[in-house]
Amino acid sequence: MTRPQKLLTVLVTGAGDGIGRATAQRLARAGHRVIGTVRSADRAAELTGLARAGGLPLSYSRLEFPSAADADALVREVESLGRLDVLVNNAGFGVFGAVEHVGAEDTARQFAVNVFGPLDLTRRLLPLLRASRGRVIWIGSLAGRISLPFQAHYSATKAAVAAIGDAMRMELRPLGVQVCCVEPGDFATAFTGARAVVDPPGSAYQAAQARCLRAAERQERGGGSPEAAAALVERLCRARRLPARAPVGRLARTMCAVHRLLPDRLRERAVRLNYDL
């Protein structure tokens, strides 16, 4: 069952492209008031102008984790609206490299952008969400269930997001706030091309990493449209009761079932074969 149709106020982080942009635009087309975030003020102004020209109730604001000034300004903007019904935590990126070569700085940035920044933003917006009996939708990844080679740190952040969502769901349920973690599989976005590749030339992992990256890019190109994930988020914004986890994408549910059923050794072998290792 779904909620009665009503207009919501929604904040979508990482809304410049991919799943975030598709989600923000889809919700705005449905008439909801949407704030999307992007990493630069110029990009925010550009996308806001395009949305307004199209008659959409959609505006964009700058937010680059872990900037405290950006987060402060965004929280004030949302508070000025007087209401927040849904927070979609979508912002994130991926570090691509062998564990041996991902240093402390890259590790810190990976967790700051994917976990610590969104967590702090969520914490600060919870009073508004409690008041509206709203919901928090984390955009995780199947990589949070199935750790990927040369993407250990990205996988770790998505596992952390899912764990945080699980705990928040239990804490907030008595207060009327629902929490869900969406777990996308491969989608045809620019995500792979935006990954930060950190392995130095000539490393012992170079050949394996190149094969793995080619496989990841191939799978992304063959993935579905991010509109499928956006459609799921829209349904979750209105659903009466949210699931704990919501896999989305081609074969996503099948992959989750296989992950649960296969022994560790066979599961690892399947991942290695999938990534040409």
Image (tube, grey):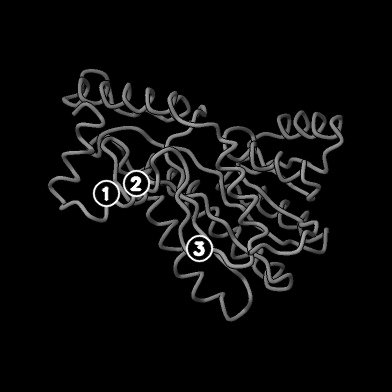
- Up-down: is 202 above or below 228? above
Q: Residue at x 74, y 47 (%)?
A: 35
- Other-residue count near label 2 (Cα within 10 Å), few / some / many at <14 / 14–19 / ≥20: few
Residue at numbered disc 1: 258
Determine whether the residue tagged by mark 1 lies in a helix, strand or loop.
helix
| Circle on res. 101 | none
Tag of residue 254: 2
Q: Is residue 125 left or right of residue 101?
A: right
Instruction: Locate residue 131: give its quadrant.
Output: bottom right
Number of the front mark, 2 or 3: 2
- Relative height, residue 223 to residue 35 (above, below): above
Residue 243 got which mark? 3
Q: Relative to residue 139, is residue 98 depicted above or below?
A: above
Residue that appears at 15% across and 53% down: 263
Q: CA distance from mark 2 to mark 3?
A: 17 Å
Amino acid type, mark 3:
Pro
Residue occupying image coordinates x 54% and y 31%: 225
Mark 3 lies on a secondary structure that is loop
